[in-house]
Amino acid sequence: MRMKQLLAITASTIVVASVASAQNFSYTASYSGPGPSNVLVDTFSNGSVVNNNAGQPVNFTSTSYDVNAPKAGQTNQTITAGDLQEGVQASSSAFTEEQALFTSRANAVVLGNTGDYIDFIMEFTDTANVIGPGNNADHNELTIGLFDSGGTAPLTANLATLTSETGGSQNWKGYYSAIFQANGNQNSGLFYRGIQNTGTGDQSLTITKTLINGGYFGSTYALINGSQSSSINMTNASQYTEDFRVTMSAPGVLTISNEVFSGIGTTGMCDYAFGGYTNASDFTFDGLAFSITDKGSFGPTQDISLIDITTNVPEPSTWLLIISGFGVVLAMVSRRRQ
């Protein structure tokens, strides 16, 4: 009977640890999110900045979004209450990419078991021409990705034109999605971006040199079954939600998926969805990136209202509580036997 009581106490300890871990966060998503634990929930009203090179989030609701852009004037992104404004001046070849750490290195999300995942949700308004019709905009793209920073914060320079700068996101590695508009000649795809050599574009995370000036030079590794004919044209002034997820689907295998929903949240109509998979050796994530490009001089802009990173992997502190709970039980059982 005593043993059953001890096990019940341990189970309660585990539940309390999990609840306490979840309550460390000040916010919950504006809808029922896909994961039980929030890592970063940013509504841009709690101290987030642009180009502050903070190195890590101030807390679980803010961080620094450092801008990577190939042309002068493209780095002037702004944050106001509830809104990160991202835009590209009209050009036949330009992009703007936001890079950020979403947690400290000590609390990086590590996928260790089959079924573990990390999820990146972005809610935004297509304020102008993000993915819309246009014969000359076949390479306009909307990208989103999750990365392993290696513990290095992004830089805050005009990153895409650097030729000798080291550090920053040069050594980041991870996965991203690039969605192209429906009437273009470029398929959407899921890709692996590996560590880059020093050179122009080596700070870019989601843009390749083959598609636009200022992109990274390294080889683009498409995921298995990760290519998809695009079938989405967004409507100006409409709201959308993009959901990018990385899942350990088997030991040493990651499955990546991307979905776009009409409206706020993931309960609306799914406008576009695709996925792929790859063999992997790195399962750590603490950085994110997203971008828009202009290939038809349309000047695309979007207003982002939510960045939400969730995971089903417990925090290290939660595991410590769980392990310590079992340790207490084992110690008491050992004393009883003695």
Image: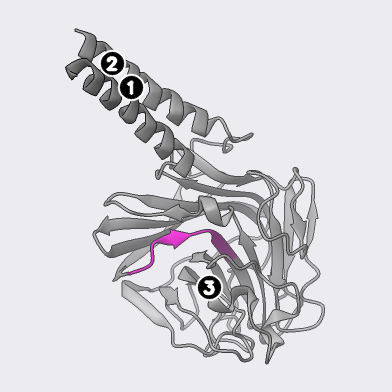
Q: Which residue is mark 2?
A: 6
Q: Amino acid at mark 1?
A: Thr
Q: Sequence order check: which comes first, mark 3 or mark 1?
A: 1
Select label 3 or label 1 by which is in front. 1
Q: Which residue is mark 1?
A: 10
Q: Amino acid at mark 3?
A: Trp
Q: At which x and y percent is residue 221? A: 39, 81
In the displayed structure image, the side of residue 321 where residue 102 appears, left or right: right
How far separated are the C-alphas under marks 3 and 1?
40 Å
Q: At which x and y percent is residue 154? A: 66, 69
Q: Residue at x 42, y 37 (%)?
A: 320
Q: What are the residue bounds of the magenta stretch?
A: 281-289
Mark linked to residue 221: none
Picture quarter containing residue 87?
bottom right
Picture quarter containing residue 222?
bottom left
Image quadrant for the C terminus?
top left
Q: At which x and y percent is residue 51? A: 77, 65
In the displayed structure image, the side of residue 331 where residue 25 appears, left or right: right
How far separated are the C-alphas under marks 2 and 3?
45 Å
Most foreground residue, 150 or 70:
150
Q: Residues within 10 Å of mark 2 (few under 14, many from 20)?
A: some
Disc 1 is placed on an element classified as: helix
In this view, which residue lies farthest toward the front?
A: 338
Mark linked to residue 172: 3
Residue 285 located within the stretch drawn in magenta: yes
Q: Are marks 3 and 1 in contact (CB under 8 Å)?
A: no
**Residue 36, relative to residue 228: is it above or below?**
above
Q: Residue at x 38, y 67 (%)?
A: 282
Q: Residues within 10 Å of mark 1 (few under 14, many from 20)?
A: many
